Image (cartoon, rainbow, N blue to C red):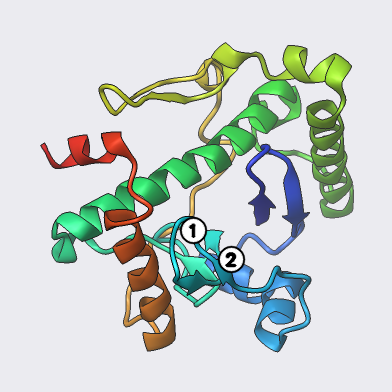
Amino acid sequence: MALVDSDLKFLYADVGRNGRMNDSGVWAATDLRARIDRGIAEFPKAAQLPNSTKTAPFVIVGDEGFGMKPYLMRPFPASELEDAERIFNYRLSRGRRIVENGFGILRNRFQVYGAPLRHKPDRAVKVVKATIALHNYLRTKNGTRARYTPPDSLDVEDVLTVTVRQGSWRKGVNDKAVFPLERIGGRQPDDAKAVREVFRDYFMNEGQVSWQWKVLE
């Protein structure tokens, strides 16, 4: 379980959980989740949205594998997709693409992820943490950044057609080496839904971008 920032660097990683734990259980067991819920994580305070009088909290971009929280957004379910919800889901997916690029580059650049790790648990944890540290270092250093992640290595969206050009990191990636999260259903908390609605309305008004309407065509 990991948190990736907008620069493709890993801000947080929880490594070594028992593989028999279900996906929601992994997130629930992390110290990050506990610190956020207790209000002691170093999370930025809520701020005014650009070009708006509305205030919103900083949030983590998630998918259907996570239960929604006021600090963790997930898409609207397919059964609720009016135009505003489709736009929200599209905008959220653009954020998730950054996360996918971060994980994808890590998997592609370090050949150890070409197959499931066959190490003792304590050694496997060290290997994963080492690759994450090296990934962040290579993304930070100007001399190595361009070689480590050249432009064609990343998934990039063409905003004129709202289509995605797949990055070269996808070539040769073994999807059996890393397993996706399962979707989590159930009712979402009202306070979390209220935050999601703030962003939904913002993306339809002051926060809109000109090309987003193409997803409605």
Q: Is residue 119 above or below residue 88?
A: above
> In which quadrant of the rendered image does the C terminus lie?
top left
Q: Secondary structure at mark 2?
A: loop
Query: Picture coordinates of residue 118 (x, y %)?
Result: 75, 39
Query: How busy is the neighbourhood of tag 1: few (under 14 within 10 Å), some, or many (20 plus)?
Result: many
Disc 2 residue type (three-letter)? Phe
Marks 1/2: CA–CA distance: 13 Å
- Residue 177's disc is none
* Residue highlighted by disc 2: 58
Query: Picture coordinates of residue 125 (x, y %)?
Result: 83, 50
Query: Picture coordinates of residue 25 (x, y %)?
Result: 58, 73
| Quadrant of the image occupied by residue 117 | top right
Q: Is residue 201 visible?
A: yes
* Residue highlighted by disc 1: 62
- Depth order, front residue of 117/33: 33
Query: Picture coordinates of residue 144 (x, y %)?
Result: 84, 17
Q: Is residue 195 left or right of residue 57?
A: left
Q: Is residue 184 visible?
A: no
Q: Is residue 40 left or right of residue 60?
A: right
Q: Secondary structure at mark 1?
A: loop
Q: Is residue 24 left or right of residue 127?
A: left
Q: Is residue 18 above or below residue 149?
A: below
> In which quadrant of the rendered image does the N terminus lie?
bottom right
Q: Please name the residue shown 14% across and 42% down the image.
A: 216
Q: Please name the residue shown 79% across and 32% down the image.
A: 135
Disc 1 residue type (three-letter)? Gly
